[in-house]
Image (tube, helix red, strand yellow):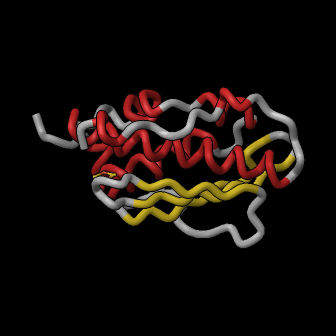
Amino acid sequence: MALYSEKVMDHFRNPRNVGVIEDADGVGEVGNAKCGDIMKIYLKIKDDTIDDVKFETFGCGSAIASSSMATELIKGKPVSDALKLTNQAVTEALDGLPAHKLHCSVLAEEAIKAAMKDYYDRHGIAYDESQFPAGHDCEHCGV
Ligand code: FES
């Protein structure tokens, strides 16, 4: 079996939703201290729905494919769905990632959550802090 699924290769070669939203309602940036990769997500939110989403990822192919797939999974969805997106869902939608690349999909989940938190903060919307755990522990994720 090839190391990377066709979906991973497709989203790596032709990433969807790459770019910047200048007047974004929420922006989230996360990085992995070990590999040095950085992911930034921009959200435009209208009527409690993800009206638009874009990303910039400076990182490995799996991180690019994960950001591309994650943006596809939340675009047009209610914000409540975006908040529930897990790295497992991103990985499954990509037909899997090699075990040592799973942390790349974690970056996508975290970047979306960080952008949602920024949206709530900017708009003075109350939220449950426990929805936004303080990042995963890179030391133990086996980068
Ligand atoms: Fe750093 Fe994939 S996100 S190696």
104 lies left or right of 130: left
Residue at 36% across / 59% down in the picture?
Answer: 37
Residue placed at 78% from the left, 41% from the top?
Answer: 49
Query: In the rendered view of the protein, which quadrant contains the C terminus?
Result: top left
113 in relation to 80, above or below: below
- Please state the horizontal and vertical placement of residue 80, each as a whole percent of the image: 73, 30
Front residue (pair 64, 35):
35
In the image, 93 versus 142, the foreground residue is 142
Q: Quadrant of residue 43?
A: bottom right
Pick the residue in front: 69 or 27: 27
Query: Quarter of the image containing the N terminus?
Result: top left
Say which residue appears at 55% left-offset and 38% top-offset.
134
**Left or right: residue 11 compared with residue 85:** left
Q: Quadrant of residue 104?
A: top left
- Give percent across and percent down for residue 64: 38, 56
Q: Position of residue 55 (x, y in %)?
A: 54, 60
Q: Position of residue 96 (x, y in %)?
A: 30, 32
Residue at 35 percent of width and 42 percent of height = 138
